[in-house]
Amino acid sequence: MDSSLYRSAAEAIAAPPETLAYVAGFDRSGQRPDALLTVDTDPQSASYGKVLNFAELPTLGDELHHFGWNACSSALAHACHENPERRYLLLPGLRSSRLHVMDTHPDPVRPRLVKTVEAKELAERAGYSRPHTLHCGPDGVFLSCLGAADGGDGPGGVALLDHTTFDVLRPWETERGPQHFAYDVWWHLGTDVGVTSEWGTPWMVEDGVLPDQLLGRKYGHALHFWELGTGRHLQRVDLGDQYQMVLELRPAHDPQAEWGFAGVVVNVEDLSSSVWLWYREGPAFTARKVIEIPAVPASADELPPALQPFGAVPPLVTDINLSVDDRWLYVSAWGTGELLQYDVSDPFHPRLASSVRLGGIAARTPHPAEPGRPLNGAPQMVEISRDGRRLYLTNSLYGAWDDQFYPDGIDPWLVKLEADPVNGGLSIDERFFPHGADFRGLRVHQTHLAGGDASSDSYCFR
């Protein structure tokens, strides 16, 4: 049995710390191959904080974004794997609709390409395109997709892939109900509940945020609940059409819990961002706003053209992550340049415990290792180690959005924070700061950790 598959969150927390991180890097111009980067995360290593390998793809124009493992700890409760092993990393191309499969064995530093699933297969077998997020699930690998076949105007949804061959099997949904937009997919494994969120169809996102669609409240603003085992739609929970773009989902890691957090990018009435708690109330689910982060006033000369009419920097909460013990919620404010740490021991009443500032549209807060160098971009994707003591942040969101909100370009960086998982508190590791030329011109987005991390696994047992 693979020792990186854990029966419970407690086992995962007690496991040895990560020594490698895998990072998705993409070329904004589409003229060079994207790559899976391997970074040394072992503080005792002579190459700590260095990029050890670039596993380049053989294709162009993929725009690697989110990616994930072929197997996670959920495999321990289901007869879906004959010999479950966290070995392969599956890399969707958000623009190309291809899926590349990288084998981390026998050399985890140098993953090698073993399979490519072409856009045609995804379209013909599942009816989808623009793959975004994937998770190893009970019946296969769940791959959320923004668009219908060939980039069509929805509905987006979830394609189911074979755990072993990675062939596209079918669409997961069997009764879609009112669901049209797609973004993230997660679940409450112990109670057979699936959850999905909403962004927009390909034409609404691929050229950046469309002002008429945003101010017209046309992007996604709801959560959907499903019967996980059958793909049957159960319930739509509308957060209100002023709350545009309901993106990242972070359910409790406790397999019997029925609550989780969803991040909302912007409230069009005041440019604030928010985090919502979903939870079961009687026979149905409901949601309430539990965190609100206001916009910050700024002068026109500090703002990109897209924001100058508003005279403010929106927080733009574009990622959230929940520690494996369900104690700490981390919120990335990609607009204002802040990573916020909330104590969610009581998920109904989060308490702000600490924060760190890096970059930001107006602030450009530098890294302490280079105090004279303003940073562009800001904390975007955040990954948490299994024991909750380390966080990894990258600064690119999505090529078209980068161009709108940071029009002077995104100079890539990967930052590590040290977290106190008992009392709260964050500090920046000054020794760990790969940036700029270290990434050979590639922008960096999601990070996953060898052996698993807070966003890779769902657990089967308490």
Image (cartoon, rainbow, N blue to C red):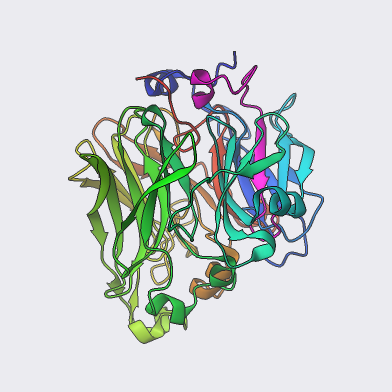
Q: Which stretch appears magenta?
A: 73-98
- Quadrant of the image containing the C terminus: top left
- Could you tell me if residue 9 is visible in this image? yes
Q: Does the magenta stretch include residue 96?
A: yes
Residue at coordinates 61% horizontally, 41% vertically from top-left?
Answer: 160
- The residue at 50%/24% (across/down) is 73
Q: Is the magenta stretch mostly helix, strand or loop?
A: loop
- Counting labels gives 0
Percent from the top left, x then y, of residue 127? Answer: 65, 54
Examine the image and state in which quarter residue 163 appears.
top right
Is 2 above or below relative to 447?
Answer: above
Q: Nearer the viewer, residue 40 or 133?
A: 133
Query: Residue 19: x and y, percent?
Result: 57, 28
Residue that protrudes farthest toward the right in the picture:
58
Residue 52 in view here: no
The quadrant the N terminus occupies is: top right
Rendered location of residue 275, percent (x, y): 30, 54
Q: Left or right: where does residue 237 sit relative to residue 102?
A: left
